[in-house]
Amino acid sequence: MVLCKRYLLLTIAHKAQGLLDSSAYCEGTFMTSTYPSASPQGSQLPALNWTNVAFFGAFHVVALLVAPFFFSWSAIAVALLLHWLFGGIGICLGFHRLISHRSFQVPKWLEYVIATLGALAIQGGPIFWVSGHRQHHAFTEHVDKDPYSAQRGFWWSHILWILYPKPEFFDPNIYQKYAPDLMRQPYYRWLDRNFLMLQVPLGLVLYALGGWSFVIYGIAVRSVLLWHSTWLVNSATHMRGYRSFESDDGSRNCWWVSLLTYGEGWHNNHHAYPRVAKSGYRWWEIDTTWWAIAVLQKLGLAKKVIAMPSQQVSPES
């Protein structure tokens, strides 16, 4: 179980040159790519990890081959609801814009609730997720230092980086150095260790509400859909779409990825201004994660919301 949990964390970390101060992240020091590109092949491909293959393979088998036998429209509704709740609120709003970039602030109790929703997405705990994302911005598309570099190709940045895990990206003693602000908080340390166990009470609740149909669609189907939605931000939005801003990487704005990820597909916008809470800058760049932040702001729960510098908005917006 210890070995399994270690790999299921999907930890993405690069060996740090000493501890990184959290204020550097908040000021954006590590949010731009400053490293030259290496060869497209990068270092030697690590060994295939059969634990990860078995885990993700099993979820895909259940979602694709077992779920049709338990189909119901109510189960579909549960899967879509939890996709939004755990993905749109937990991952996009919580893990990404709130605690990775600190694009806004909420009361600590609410931050922990939102982070718990993110942990229920089965994309790892908050410390590993935030650390990996901060490294992606710090070393964008460097074939060895960006864990899911698009320079290695679509499938590497989409899923192969998980199936062929590089040891230096999966060591908790390394990745925690990229999130010292979270490491100082006991709840985040606990959540990072125990995120996978949260599926047990979730499964019990789903079973009580709708039997195995709700369990299969609420966990397996929802997880597979949400994984691929998130992975498309790593892969497709570094290869397909348009660019509104010049940047030192290949990030793109991809409308169909944005529809699947609640606004995260406006990736070129995000890489240009990673700390800005809003990712869709033009009227037609739909960003439902921003809508949720705006609701929290109107309710007085979201404060210090970082806005786009008005002079930087494209004249086409």
Image (cartoon, helix red, strand yellow):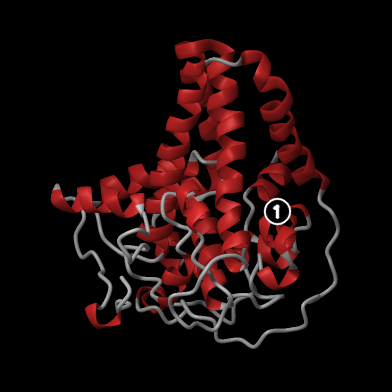
What amino acid is found at the position of numbered circle 1 in the picture?
Ile
- Residue 77 sits above or below residue 93 on the image: above
Image quadrant where one finds the C terminus: bottom left
- Say which residue label 1 marks: 159
Image quadrant where one finds the N terminus: top right
Q: Going 81% across and 75% down the picture, which residue do you hit?
A: 41
Decide which of 161, 67 is in the foreground and name it: 67
Q: Going 49% across and 61% down the picture, which residue do you hit?
A: 130
Image coordinates for residue 58, horizontal then vertical, percent: 74, 32
Residue 220 seen: yes
Q: Going 71% across and 21% down the picture, which residue do you hit?
A: 66
Image coordinates for residue 216, horizontal then vertical, percent: 60, 22
Q: How many marks?
A: 1
Residue 300 seen: no
Tell me the quarter of the picture where residue 223 sits: top right
- Residue 232 sits above or below residue 71 on the image: below
Decide which of 7, 105 is in the foreground and name it: 105
- Left or right position of 150 against 30: right
Name the residue at the front extreme.
316
